[in-house]
Amino acid sequence: MKSTRLPVTCILLALGLASCSLTPQNAAPIAPLPASWKNAAAFPVPSAERDLTRWWNRFDDPVLTHIISDGLANSPDIASAAASIRESRARRNQTAASLLPSLTGSASSNSSSVKTSGSSRDSDTTYSAGLDASWEVDWF
């Protein structure tokens, strides 16, 4: 008796789960757009009724108005966005340049005159130049 309960329970459980549906049965109806909103950009003369630049004001929701006003006030304009892109590219180039070999050069000259006995002067000029190259290999 006990050995037939498990298969029967599994079959009933599978049938019960198969009868469930995850699709919504009562979908909200789609509201049609008002006729005055269609082709609003094509109107030659803007009017208060046809102005869609402040569409959220028609909802009379102070929270929505505050969120959108705050977003417009704190959003970066095109110039600052372009500056951020240039800054990011410069930082990327600087980081990439550290992976390349570096080359350093220097040059100097030194002139000295030594007065020897009598009226003769000995002048001594030395020149030096240096060139250093380095490259740090990043194994990881």
Image: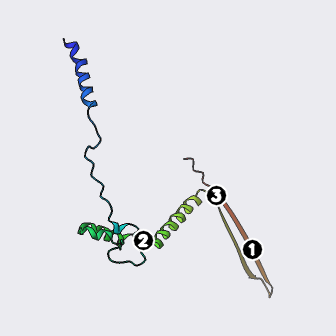
* Residues at discs 2 and 1 in contact (Cβ within 8 Å): no
Q: Residue furthest top?
A: 1
> Above or below — where is 81 with respect to 30?
below
Q: Amino acid at mark 2?
A: Ala
Instruction: Tell me residue 31's x, y (percent).
Output: 29, 58
Between 9 and 96, the one nearer to me in the picture: 9
Mark count: 3
Circle 2 sits in a helix, a strand or a loop, which is it? Answer: helix
Residue topped by disc 3: 101
Q: Earlier in the sequence, mark 2 or mark 3?
A: 2
Q: Amino acid at mark 1?
A: Thr
Q: Earlier in the sequence, mark 2 or mark 1?
A: 2
Instruction: Tell me residue 15's x, y (percent).
Output: 26, 26
Q: Residue furthest bottom?
A: 119
Q: Image point 67% across, 62% down: which residue? A: 132
Q: CA distance from mark 1 to mark 3?
A: 30 Å
Q: Image point 54% across, 64% down: which residue? A: 89
Q: Quadrant of residue 49?
A: bottom left
Q: CA distance from mark 2 to mark 1?
A: 79 Å
Circle 1 sits in a helix, a strand or a loop, which is it? Answer: strand
Q: Image point 60% across, 54% down: which residue? A: 136
- Asked whether, in this view, residue 97 is left or right of residue 85, the answer is right
- Asked whether, in this view, residue 14 is left or right of residue 43, the answer is left
Residue topped by disc 1: 126
Residue topped by disc 2: 41
> Above or below — where is 27 with respect to 46?
above
Residue 12, numbered label: none
Q: Quadrant of residue 36?
A: bottom left
Q: Earlier in the sequence, mark 1 or mark 3?
A: 3
Q: Amino acid at mark 3?
A: Pro
Decide: few, some or many residues near mark 1? Use Cα within 10 Å; few <14, some 14-19, many ≥20. Answer: few
